[in-house]
Amino acid sequence: MYSSIQYAEVQSVEPLSPTLLRVHLTGGTLHAFEPNGATDAYINARFLPAGSPVTVPFTPEDVEQAGPEHRPRPRRFTIRRWDPGTQTLSIDFVVHGDVGYAGAWAQRAKPGDRLQFDGPGGSYRPSPTADWHLLAGDESALGAIGASLEALQPEARALAFVVVDGEANEIELPSDADVDVRWLHRATADDPESLLVDAIAGAAFPAGRFDVFVHGEAAEVRAVRRHLASERGVDLSTASISPYWRRTFTDEDWRRVKRQWMAEQLLDA
C-alpha cells in the first residue's frame, strides 16, 4: 500500500462548471512520476479526515499511531492530463457541497496543500485500428473521456454521450479528431436513470468497427452494457465498461458491494 510514497502539492484550482473542479498538482515526488500511457490512467488518492493529526507524506506507522478515526480514505481519480514539461498532474473532481471526502477536499484546496497517492493504474486507450470510438458516461467519467478525445489523431472519429445536470455543466472537450459530443441533461429528462441507455439505443452508429469506453453510475453503465451486447453485437471482452459509483450509495458502501455487483453483471451477457 505504501511501498513507494508519492505525493504532490496543489498549484492551483480551476472551476470548470458548478459541480466540477480541476486541481493542478506539482512538486512533491512528481519529478519521478511515470505515466502508463492509458487515457483512463488513474491515481489512488488518499484523503485525510478533517482534523487528522497525520500530515502528507505519511507512512503506515503514522496512521497506526494516530488511530483508526484518522486513517486516510482511498479514492480513485482519473488523470485528466500529465504535462511532463512542467511536471504537472491535473485531476478533475466532482463536487457536491461537503458530501464525501474527495470533493470536500478539492473545494477547500489551496496552493501548497498536499495530496498523497499511489499509481498510476488504468489500461484503456482508443484503439488506433478502430474505425471509430464510442465513449459514454457522466461527470465521473469526464476526465477519462476528455483525455481519450484529446489523444485521438485528426483522422479519427468519435461519438460521445455525456450525462450532466444541465447546460451549465457542459465543459470544453478539445480534440483534433472528428468528434460528436451529445450532452444529456438530467434536469429536463423524464427518467434521468435511463437517459444514457435511451440515447445510445436511439442513436444511428457510424459504419465500421468501433471500440467502447463506458463508465459512470453503476445501474446506467449496466443498462448500456446489456444494450451493446444484445443489440449492437459488441464483444464485451474487448470493451472497457465499468461502474465508478452507485446511486444512493456512499463511497464506502459502494466499495463493500462492488465486487458482488460486478460478478452479477457478468451474468447479464
Image (tube, rainbow, N blue to C red):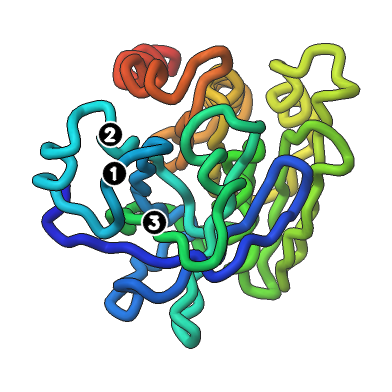
- The residue singled out by tag 2 in the image is 70
Q: Nearer the viewer, mark 1 or mark 3?
A: 1
Looking at the rendered structure, the kind of residue marked 3 is Leu
Disc 1 from disc 3: Cα separation? 15 Å
Mark 2 vs mark 1, foreground winner is 1
Give the vertical position of 105 relative to 89 (above or below): above
Q: Is residue 148 visible?
A: no
Residue nearer the viewer, 159 or 247: 247
Identify the mark nearer the N-term, 3 or 2: 2
Q: Provide residue 226's location: percent of width, then percent of height.
A: 54, 20
Q: From this view, report whether residue 82 is shown above or below residue 162.
A: below
Q: What residue is pinned by disc 1? A: 53
Residue 115 circle label: 3
Q: CA distance from mark 2 to mark 1?
A: 8 Å
Q: SS of the residue at dot 3?
A: strand
Compare marks 1 and 3 and give the one earlier in the sequence. 1
> Residue 241, image x and y in percent?
48, 35
Give the residue type that dot 1 points to.
Pro
Q: Where in the figure is residue 26, as x and y percent of width and height? A: 45, 73
The reply to whether dot 3 and dot 2 touch (C-beta < 8 Å) is no
- Distance between the Cα atoms at labels 3 and 2? 15 Å
What amino acid is found at the position of numbered circle 2 in the picture? His
Q: Nearer the viewer, residue 159 or 80?
A: 80
Residue in the image at 56% along x and 33% along y: 216
Residue at the image position 62 percent from the left and 41 percent from the top: 94
